[in-house]
Image (cartoon, rainbow, N blue to C red):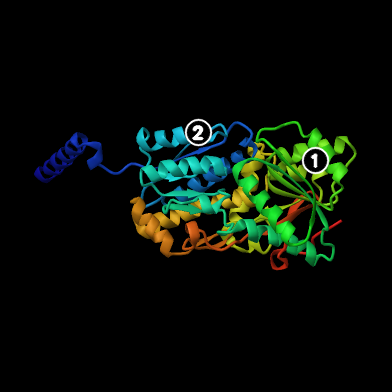
Amino acid sequence: MKILKSFLTTVAASAALLAGMPASAQAPGPIRIGSTLALTGPLSATALTHKLVGEIYVEQLNARGGLLGRKVEWTVKDDQSKPDVARTLYEQLVTSDKVDLLMGPYATGAILSAMGVAQRYNKVLVHHTFGIPSLAKYDMQFPAWSLGADPGNTVSNMLFDAMAASGKPPKTIAIVTSKFPSIHFMSLAGREVAKKRGLQEVLFLEWDFGNRDFGPIAARVKDAKPDLVWIGDIGLEGNMLLDAMKKIDYTPPNHFHLYPAPGPMTKSADGANALSLTIFEEHAPFTNNPVAADFVKIFNERAAKAGLPDTSVEVQAAASYSAWQILEAGVKGANSLDDKAIAAYLRKNRVNTIQGNLRFDGPSNYGDDLMKLKQVQNGKWLVVYPTQFAAPGAKLIVR
């Protein structure tokens, strides 16, 4: 009886002691990761994909035990597709919300704003869709968008190499582009590469980001009669331009899109044979990776329930998932939430992702250019070049 009373007294004393201890002395709370996404505005069609991917990854991460033995919580705020709003919200995440880690937003402008905040507070910023590597001056930022350090040349040459390999290289080109920063950068670089390769430029036009009247541009393209239309688009801009072309009974013989909204492009009849860039599509050899195959299955189901316009895993979803893989690898590799320790680990080590093995020891922390060329065929995006990554039986269609 005395032993039982002694035991109960000890338990009660321990409980009282724990109850009186400050929160910091008790079991640590969840690790909080903060970010913004363009949940509204002209970039929302694509940003919603990134939101769903983040939710899936955090669920999977917590099912594996979280990070450093702690559960993970993700706070995401709406930057309204505006870089200045993203800047303000990242300030709030660091100073008011006091998140432990940051994840980048969607699109180059917002990422550049977030990068400035991360640099001010010495925070690691992993990001998934930054399109101008030369502007990434901060040494604690890490890209999942594996364009390589010189995409203006490597990506443009890949497109023209692929078309030349088909036996039907274009002789004339029309370049029409948004002034959205990363889009404009890639289009201007593509323009120079086209000239060096001997293509005749029959038209060059620009529009302001947010433009919705593509009728005049469509008419100019039709009159120019190019073999290839280079469309520097982001989000739904490409769909709107193709729709404007259809209204004047014009179908471009070949059309390349930089960053279209993936689902709407495949769902539109006007999107047939559209060309674009990718790092991953949900077919072999990419789905030979069991982690990738599992993610594809989960994303397909969740995207259908969420009513997303595209339920397939493609470049945007894959880049987003890779970004989370990079952040997890950095924390676990450093065995710490210290941003400098995480950055040091990532710079020295490769990270295996669903798009491939990534390194961060090149210019601006970029590694290899892993971009591939894909095409809309039978209502689906299929990789067509390089051929070793092509979907089974798929070949580039050039008209």
Please name the residue shown 67% across and 37% down the image. Answer: 307
Front disc: 2 or 1: 2
Foreground residue among 316 and 241? 241
Quarter of the image that includes the C terminus: bottom right
Foreground residue among 69 and 244? 244
Marked residue nearer the N-terminal end (2 or 1):
2
Bin the neighbour count of mark 2 within 10 Å (Cα to Cα): few under 14, some 14-19, many 20 and up: some
Where is residue 202 drawn, in percent x and y? Answer: 81, 49
Foreground residue among 247 and 126? 247
Quarter of the image that includes the N terminus: top left
Please name the residue shown 81% across and 33% down the image. Answer: 215
Bin the neighbour count of mark 1 within 10 Å (Cα to Cα): few under 14, some 14-19, many 20 and up: many
Q: Check disc 2 and give the amino acid type.
A: Asp
Where is residue 139 drawn, in percent x and y? Answer: 42, 54
Where is residue 78 drawn, in percent x and y? Answer: 52, 32
Which residue is tagged 2?
Answer: 84
Where is residue 340 drawn, in percent x and y? Answer: 35, 53
Q: Check disc 1 and give the amino acid type.
A: Leu
Which residue is tagged 1?
Answer: 242
